Amino acid sequence: MHNQYKTADGQRDCVLTAETELNVEKTVSQWLNELRTADVKKAMPILSFPCVQLLNVSVKELISDSDLQAKGMKAVADRCDSAAAVSMMDLSVEAEAFGAQVRFSDDEVPTVIGKLLETPEDAQKLAVPEMGAGRTALYAEAIKKACELICDRPVLAGVIGPFSLSGRLMDMTEIMVNCYVEPEMVHTTLQKATDFIIKYIKSFRDAGAHGVVIAEPAAGLLSPDLNAEFSVPYIKQIVEAVKSENFAVVYHNCGNTIPLIDDILTVNADIYHFGNAVDLEEIAPHIPTDVIFMGNVDPAGEFRNGTVASIKQNTKEIMQKCCKYKNFVISSGCDIPPMSSWENIDAFFEATAEFYR
């Protein structure tokens, strides 16, 4: 059975074929409720870049071609029975749109190099890019094409969070210092980053995406007070601007979120996704029962460098501890690296299915 999900404007986004049996039309809110309340839940890892192995292309080729990205997401969806299809988590795109330099690789995700901002005057002069700058239009087009190919589950886009983006524009060490010595410079940059991220997410929503994963890993470096000042208010702006009955927001932070959790929960995301830096058993009691939380099989240690036996064991151990919470969904701890073993990825899904038997 294939379920049809409405887009943010209430329209259907899949091209129906003879092979696509339309049985149920759901809102994204209904999907979230079913995911939260199901006795047997599908895994939802942040899984996209390993599609390069399925397509036999390089990462550099993938991030430069919307057709390849859509086909890659479809290939992953065909192979893996996941709760949703997640797009390429390329956290260099937004910084590149602002003018940052990016280093590309054949087998690793792109990385931002250097810095754009050194002084408060630089931050004041920084222009908010138009949608379409850099590779942003290409990524929006990839989502549109993916939504035409994937009809049996929601399709989620991916963006960087405002503090993490600002850190890439300013340099992570510098932004941590500037939170104390130049806080207004940081706030100026954060607001411009936030304004652009909202535009970028709306382009995904217009392209047919059913939601977005906002990756805010750098906020995990902040103290509770700094997180409350320099990350949470800006995430809230984004959530308020884009979240709806037909557009879900997933908040991801792979840092040590335990001291930050109560403030993080105020951003009002639909799903909270945690990295393997934390023990989810400590996080779980803080999460309201009507909100989904996910995590946190180690992407590097298990998916990339583990074995079939080790990833199965780790997946089941996490599920054993956390599946007593009805609102828990097993996932990776972060974006799964491009050259991760497909044997390990398959084993993760097998372990999930075995746990529920």
Image: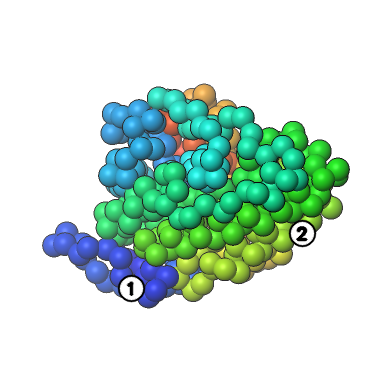
Q: Residue at x 78, y 40 (%)?
A: 176
In the structure shown, which secondary structural element does the residue marked by tag 1 occupy?
loop
In the structure shown, which secondary structural element does the residue marked by tag 2 occupy?
helix
Q: Quadrant of residue 174?
A: top right
Q: Residues within 10 Å of mark 2 (few under 14, many from 20)?
A: some
Q: Position of residue 175 (x, y in %)?
A: 74, 40
Q: Residue at x 27, y 71 (%)?
A: 23
Q: Is residue 339 left or right of residue 299?
A: left
Residue 98 badge: none
Q: Quadrant of the N terminus?
A: bottom left
Colour scheme of the picture: rainbow
Q: Position of residue 254 (x, y in %)?
A: 64, 42
Q: Position of residue 201 (x, y in %)?
A: 49, 59
Q: Is residue 265 left or right of residue 61?
A: right
Count of numbered circles on the image: 2
Tell whether label 1 touches label 2 (CB within 8 Å). no
The amino acid type, in three-letter code, at marker 1 is Gln
113 above or below 238?
A: above
Which is closer to the viewer, label 2 or label 1? 1
Q: Residue at x 38, y 68 (%)?
A: 7
The amino acid type, in three-letter code, at marker 2 is Asp
Q: Is residue 23 visible?
A: yes
Q: Position of residue 283 (x, y in %)?
A: 71, 52
Q: Is residue 322 left or right of residue 120?
A: left
Q: Residue at x 44, y 25 (%)?
A: 105
Q: Residues within 10 Å of mark 1 (few under 14, many from 20)?
A: few
Which residue position is annotated with label 1? Answer: 11
How far apart are the alpha carbons under marks 2 and 1?
36 Å
230 above or below 337?
A: below
Which of pointers 2 and 1 lies earlier in the amino acid sequence? 1
